[in-house]
Amino acid sequence: MPHRAAFTLAELLITLGIIGVVAALTIPQLIKNVKHHVLENQFKQASSVLQQVVLLAREELGVDNLKKFCTSYEGILGENISYINSTQCIQALNYAFTKDSSMYVNSVGEHSVERDPNSMRTYNNKTVLQDYGGIAGPYALKVMRQNLNGLLLNFTVIELQVYINVDINGFDGPNQLGHDIFIFYLSDKDTLTGHKQTAVYTDEELAEMDFDEEYQRARAGYPCNKISGSSANGFGCTWFAINDIDPETNKKGYWKNLP
């Protein structure tokens, strides 16, 4: 009988070993890429919902500019100003989000859901998120409303802004600022925007800087980076997420390069 070429046992084992190494190196990255793609789609869906909420609230109030209406104030700027229409503004936004009670978990009223603040972390997963660490508004991420799609949000009028604090996938993970938790605010033209990182400070640099309030230290430079231990790291990520810009390189690829 003619001799037939075949793999030896050693060759088969080597081949299987190579396949195993390649799989071990590539599968985790593939899973990570899929998760980031899911978050990107959820972010886009949440943004669409928020745009509709702003439009409905504006119609409900009968105003041409929601931000201008909501941030009208009396008093001396920089001191203890009082927002004249803030209560009416937030009520209109909540009503817009929960307008059809058959579609939402929390219908119009004071109903909301509470979450464990210790379950939420910063952009680089280095620190637990704390409201006192510079996140917009008291209890901004702890007490929120939820719809049937899992979207969690609340509204705050503070700092001459209308802030919309959002968790795009509710109680699902990773529960990190800049991943599934974002802080939007309304531009002067009522479009959704967010703060953008302006500087990157190390923990050592922040420790040496002087601030009147601790939250100012946490927000310094509007952090959105892989190194900062700031308790508000991720506060400056929303602009990058909207525009799909990687804050490390200032090039396209925010969602592909999440830490």
Image (cartoon, grey):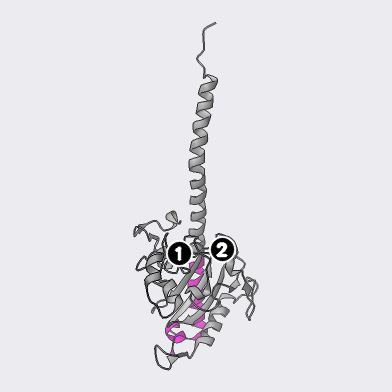
Write down the quadrant of residue 97 in the picture: bottom right
Residue receiving disc 1: 229
Please report whichever mark, 1 or 2, sits nearer to the chain's N-terminal start.
Answer: 2
On the rendered structure, is 176 left or right of 242? right
Of 59 and 172, nearer the camera is: 172
**Corner quadrant of residue 198:** bottom left
Q: Which residue lies furthest to the top in this view?
A: 1
Residue 187 position, x and y percent, is 40, 77
- Residue 137 in percent (x, y) is at 50, 78
Type of secondary structure dominating the magenta stretch: helix
Label 2 crowd bin: few (<14), some (14–19), many (20+), radius 10 Å:
many
Q: Which of 255 and 122 is in front in this view?
A: 122
Residue 221 visible somewhere in the drawing:
no
123 versus 141 height, above or below? above
- Secondary structure of the residue carrying tag 1 is loop
Based on the picture, tell me whether residue 94 belongs to the magenta stretch: no
What's the residue at 39%, 65% (across, down)? 204
Q: Is residue 110 left or right of residue 233?
A: right
Is residue 56 on the magenta stretch? Answer: yes
Residue kind at label 1, given as amino acid type: Gly
Residue at (52% x, 35% y) in the render: 20
Q: Which segment is the magenta one?
A: 44-72
On screen, 93 above or below 237? below
Label 2's element? loop
Query: Mark 2 is on which residue type?
Result: Asn
Where residue 216 sits in the image (x, y, percent)?
A: 42, 76
* Image position, residue 259 (x, y; %): 46, 56
Q: Name the residue under label 2.
A: 169
